[in-house]
């Protein structure tokens, strides 16, 4: 989409303003279907930084996510519309299973979403 769906932008703004991570969503983007729960951007960055910090080889990249939090004057609580969806406990649906098994952290540009539905689409390994 060249112009993000206004209803989807409103959902993203509500997740940001209420700091909720309970909204399940499935989106279609070029090359993938992602299903999972939305998280506020600050919480998403914090969780990614924690994972990186725990890695011996990737720990230094955690600073990129924590330093960005200090520069978040563009956040929706300051009046701007969100530009991205932040998924946690999310999977890329591939055939009849989801990747990764445990769920991952994905950042999706709202303008790239071509279709979406409320809810987390289940999958089966059988």
Image (cartoon, helix red, strand yellow):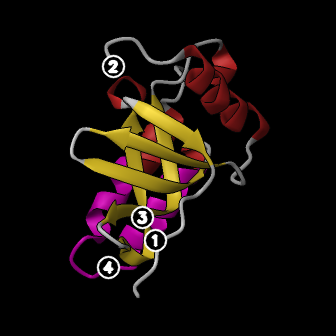
Q: Is residue 50 part of the magenta span, yes or no?
A: yes
Tag in front: 1 or 2: 2
| Upstream in sequence: badge 1 or badge 2 | 2
Q: Nearer the viewer, residue 91 or 118?
A: 118
At 41% across and 88% down in the image, what residue appears? 126
Looking at the rendered structure, the secondary structure element under dot 1 is strand
Q: Quadrant of residue 110?
A: top left
Tag in front: 2 or 4: 2
Q: Which residue in the protein does label 3 denote?
A: 91
Mark 2, other Cα within 10 Å: few <14 / some 14–19 / many ≥20: few
Q: Is residue 37 placed above or below 9 in the rendered structure?
A: below
Looking at the rendered structure, the secondary structure element under dot 4 is loop
Q: Which residue in the protein does label 1 denote?
A: 103
Residue 17: percent from the left, percent from the top? 74, 31
At 35% across and 61% down in the image, what residue appears? 92
At 74% across and 47% down in the image, what residue appears? 20
Q: CA distance from mark 3 to mark 4?
A: 22 Å
In the rendered structure, find residue 1 and report the number of the disc placed on it: 2
Q: Which residue in the protein does label 4 denote?
A: 55
Q: Quadrant of residue 77?
A: top right
Q: Residue furthest bottom?
A: 126
Residue 58: percent from the left, percent from the top? 25, 70
| Upstream in sequence: badge 2 or badge 3 | 2
């Amino acid at each position: 989409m060249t112009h993000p769906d206004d209803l989807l932008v409103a959902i993203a703004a509500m997740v940001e303003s209420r700091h909720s991570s309970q909204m399940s969503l499935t989106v279609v983007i070029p090359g993938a279907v992602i299903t999972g729960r939305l998280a506020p951007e600050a919480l998403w960055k914090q969780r990614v930084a924690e994972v990186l910090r725990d890695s011996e080889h990737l720990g230094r990249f955690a600073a990129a996510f924590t330093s960005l939090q200090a520069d978040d004057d563009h956040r929706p609580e300051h009046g701007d519309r969100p530009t991205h969806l932040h998924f946690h406990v999310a999977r890329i649906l591939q055939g009849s299973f989801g990747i990764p098994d445990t769920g991952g952290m994905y950042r999706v540009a709202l303008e790239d979403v071509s279709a979406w539905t409320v809810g987390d689409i289940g999958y089966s390994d059988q």
